[in-house]
Amino acid sequence: MKRRELLLGAGVASAALVGCQQKGKRGDEGPLREALRSVRDPRPLVPASPRPPMRPIGDTSHGLMLNRAAFGPSAAELQRFDELGKDGWLAEQLKAPVHDDDESLALRWRLKGLEVFHTPAYELRDTPQKVVMEQLGRSAILRATYSKWQLRERLCDFWANHLNIYARKVYSAPTRPNTAAELMYLLPTDLTHVVRQNALGSVKDVIRASMKSAAMLGYLDQQVSDAKHPNENYARELLELHTMGVDGGYSQRDVMEVARCLTGWTIEDRFLSGLSLSGLFQDGLPDHKTGEVYFNDKRHDDGEKVVFGTKIPAGGGKKDASTVLDLIAAHPSTARFISRKLVRYFYGDDEHSAGLTEKVAATYQKSGGAITAMVHTLFTASEFDAAPPILKRPFDFTISALRATNALTDGSLGVQDHLTRMGQPLYEWPMPDGYPEKNQAWTGSLLARWNFAIALTSGAVAATQIDTDKDAAGALLSPLPEFSGKPEERLALALASPDFQWK
Amino acid sequence: MNQWGLCEENSRVGSARRALIGGALAAAIVAWAGRSALAQVTVGKTHRKPLVTIFLRGAMDGLTALPPTGDDEYFKNRPTIKVTNSLKLDGFFGLHPALGALHPLYLEGKLAPLHAVGSLDQSRSHFEAMAVMERGAASDPASIPSGWVARYLSALPEDNPSPLRGVAFNTILPDILRGATSAMAINSITDLQLHASPSLRTAIEGMYAKGDDPASVAGRETLEVLKVLEKLDPKSYKPGGGAQYPESNLGNGLRQTAMLLKAGVGLETACLDRGGWDTHVGQNTPFLAQQLQDVGDSLGAFTKDLGPQLENVTIVVMTEFGRRVAENSGLGTDHGRASAWFVAGGGVKGGKVYARWPGLKDDQLEAPGDLKVTTDYRDVLIELAARQIGLEKAAALFPASPGKRVGLF
C-alpha cells in the first residue's frame, strides 16, 4: 500500500512510548524505534549495521558488483568478470537480449519444459494451481541461478516486485457473475510480456505493457471499472506505487480522473466462465483473445477529464489511456520515484542515496527513461563503491548460495519449500508494494536460512546437488570459517554465517 | 543494537536487563519453561494479561455471523441467504449456529459480540482496509509506519526479556507486528528446529555470539527461542478441559498459543489469521458456515483449554470490513463497510451485544448500500490495550481516535 513512512500521524503514536527520549545512538535502536524516530526526524537513516558487505572473494569491486548486479558470484561469472573487468562486464550485461537463444543448452532445455510459459491463458484453465505455481517458481529460480544475463534477471526481480501481483488472488469476471479465477493463470503472460520483455527497455514501455496486463488489471480490479462505477484501485496504484510515488504531487481528484480515463479497459472473461468458446463472440473479439485485455468502448467514460491540470478533451476513447501514460512518464516525480526505487534495490539506503537518486533521475530525463542508461549511471557513480550493506532477501540468499556452491538444481519444490519457510514464497506477496526491502523485515528468517544451508550442503534439498568436489564448492566461500567437523558442515557454516546474509 | 527495542533513557533498568540478557538469559528462560503452568507472565513484578488477535482476512459478513434478526429489513435484503436458525443472544441479534461453540461463553458473560464496527477507510479495498486496521490508522495506512501490536509491546513495562513476546502464526511477520522487536513469525512450533549436528550448532552459536549487526542480533534471539521451545515438546501437549481443537490452521495456532501461555515463556501477544471470507458468491452454499464453524470451534476449544487462566487472557476477533447489506445476483455479497467483531476472555463484560445499530433502511445505509460504521474499531482496541497499559497510553497507540467509550471492561 502506501509506502510513505514519514507522515505526521505516527508522531502521536510515538507519544505512547513514554519515557523514551532519543539519546541512544542510532545503531542502538530497534526497528520500531527507528521507524518512529524517522517520523520525528526526517534525516536519512544510518543503517544499524556498521558491518561491511561480505567480500567473498577478497576483492571489493568483484564482491560488490556481482552481489548487486548479479545474484552473487559463480565460478563462471567470476571468470567472465576477470576477463572483461568491471566496466566491460557491465557493458556486456547491459546489452542483454530479450530472448533466451544464447543461454546455455541446459537452461533452455529446462525452461522449455515449463509449459505454463508456452501456453495461452485460455488453454491453462484446467492446469492445477500447484503446477502453475511450481512452474512460475522454477522459472524464477532457474533463470536467476543460471542465466548468463544476470543483470537482466536482477531487473526482472526488480520489476516483478515493483509491479507486484499476488498469484493467489481470485479475480472476478467483469460481466459474468459467479465466475472467478486465480491470477496465477495470467501471471506467465505478465512476467514474459511486461517484465522480461522490458526489463532493460524504457520505463514508459514497462508501464504501458503493465497497463495492458490482464494479471495486473485483475489484481487491482480494473476489469470491473466502467463509466458508471469507475474503480480507483488500479488508477491509484498506477500513480502511487508504479510511477509517481505517494508524494508525487497528484491529488485524490487526479486519481479519480485517471480512473475515468481508464474505464473500459477490461479482461475478456469467457476464459473464466467455463463456457465453451465458440459461439460466444463478445465485442467482435476473436476466440483466442479470451483472457486478454481489451478496450470496451461501451464501458468507457468519454467525457472531458483533467489530469495534473491538463485538459483531456471528450471523445478520446481508448486514447485516453495513452494520454495518461504520456503525462505520467514525462512527470519529474516519476523520474525521481523510479530512480529512488532502483537506488534502494541496487545500492541500498544511506545518507548518499538521495544524491545518487538525483543523478539517476537526471539520466531518466536525458534518456527518456532508458533503464540501461539509468542503471549504468547507478553502477558507475562514485557513490557505488561505498554502498551500504543490504541484508539479502531469502530469494537472494538462496540463489547466491546455489551459485556459490556450483549447485545443480531444477528449481522445483525442493528449493521452493525452503523459500516458503524463509518467508518469501514466490509471487505470493499479497500487497501491491512487493516484498519488503527493509533489512529489518527479514531478520526473522535466519533459522530457515540455516536449515537451508545445512540441507543444501548435505544433499537434502530435493533435485538439488552442490558440486561433488567439495573444494570447488567452497572456493567462492573462502576463507571458510574454522571448523573441525565434516567438510560439508563447514560449507553449511559459511552459508549460515552472518556475513553471508549480507551483500 | 538494543535488541529489546528499548531506548537508552531507562539506563538503570536497561543495564540490569542487559546483564540478564548477556549472561543468565538462557538459564532464566529455561527456568520459566520448566515452571508450573502460569497463565500470566510473571517476570519481574508485573502481571501480564496476554492479548490474542484473530484477523479474519477478506471481510467477514457480519450480517451472517451476527444476524440482526430483530430488523425486518435484514430479511427483505437477503431473501435467499438470510440466517433463519440463529441462536438467541439478546432478542435482536442472533448468533449463527455454526458459531454454537461460543454460545456458552456468551451465556457465562465471557463473550462480547460487537456489531457495526469498522474504520473510516472507505476504499473497500482489502489491502487498504487491512493495512489500516493492522497499523491502527484512521483511514490512511501510510500515516503510520508500524503495527499497533508492535507499539503496544513497546508500551508495556520493560521487564520481560523473552524473545517470544509477540508471535504471529504466519510465514512472514504481518503488518500488525511490523516494527516489533522480540516478535517472531512461526508457521508451527514444531517447525522451529535447527537440523544441525551438535558440533555444527555450537559453531553457529559461536559465529552469532558477538556481532552487533541486525543479522547477528536476530541470530542470537533465534537461538534463544530455540532453547525455550526445545524444553516444551509441543507434540505431547494435552489441551486442558477435554478441549478438542479443529485440525485447521487457526485451531493449530490457538492450540500452540495455549501451550506457550501455559508454559510461561513470556508470550504477551499472539496474532493469528483466518482467510477466505471474501464471499462475493455462493453464500447459500455451506462454505461460509464451514468458515464460521472453524472460528467458533477453534475459539471454543481455546477458551476451554485455558480454563481458569482465561481470566488473564483477552481475545479479539476482527475483520477489515463487512459486506453489502443486499445479496447480489450471485447469492453472495460485495464489499461493504461495518461488520461484526468479537471480544472474549477474562474481565470482558460479556453476555450482551455491543452495537449502536444504525439500521438497514435505505436512508440509514452508507452508499451504495452498506451498514454504517457506528463504532470505530480503534475505540474497541483501545479498551483492550488499556486493560494492560492504561487508557492514556492505549489511546496514544491509535492517533486521533474518536475516543467514544464502548464499555467492554
Image (spheres, rainbow, N blue to C red):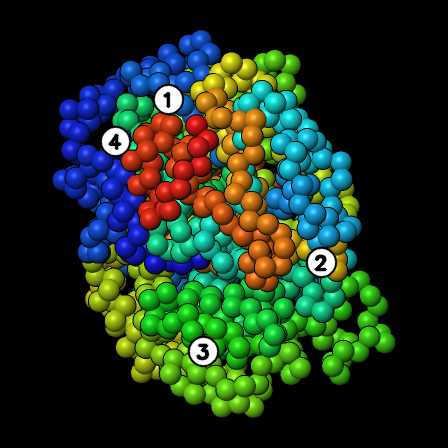
Q: Amino acid at mark 4?
A: Lys
Q: Please give the residue where the numbered disc 4 appears in the rendered image.
A: B210
Q: Chain of mark 4?
A: B
Residue A66 screen position, x and y as percent: 36, 58
- Residue depth check, mark 3 versus mark 2: number of the one nearer the observer: 2
Contact (CB < 8 A) between labels 3 and 2? no
Q: Please give the residue where the numbered disc 3 appears in the rendered image.
A: A204
Mark 4 and mark 2: Cα distance apart in space: 61 Å
Q: Please give the residue where the numbered disc 1 appears in the rendered image.
A: B48
Mark 2 vs 1, N-terminal side: 1
Disc 1 element: loop
At a point 37% along the width and 67% down the height, the residue shown is A245
- Residue depth check, mark 4 versus mark 1: number of the one nearer the observer: 1
Q: Chain of mark 3?
A: A
Q: Amino acid at mark 1?
A: Arg
- Residue depth check, mark 2 versus mark 1: number of the one nearer the observer: 2
Q: Is residue A85 left or right of residue A23?
A: right
* Viewer-side residue, A382 vs B169: B169
Q: Is residue A46 left or right of residue A410?
A: left
At a point 53% along the width and 36% down the height, the residue shown is B354
Q: Chain of mark 1?
A: B
Mark 4 vs 2, N-terminal side: 4
* Viewer-side residue, B169 vs A404: B169
Residue A177 screen position, x and y as percent: 73, 62
Mark 3 and mark 4: Cα distance apart in space: 47 Å
Categorize mark 2 by other alpha carbons within 10 Å: few (<14), some (14-19), many (20+): some
Q: Amino acid at mark 2?
A: Asn
At a point 69% along the width and 65% down the height, the residue shown is A173
Contact (CB < 8 A) between labels 3 and 4? no
Q: Please give the residue where the numbered disc 2 appears in the rendered image.
A: B328
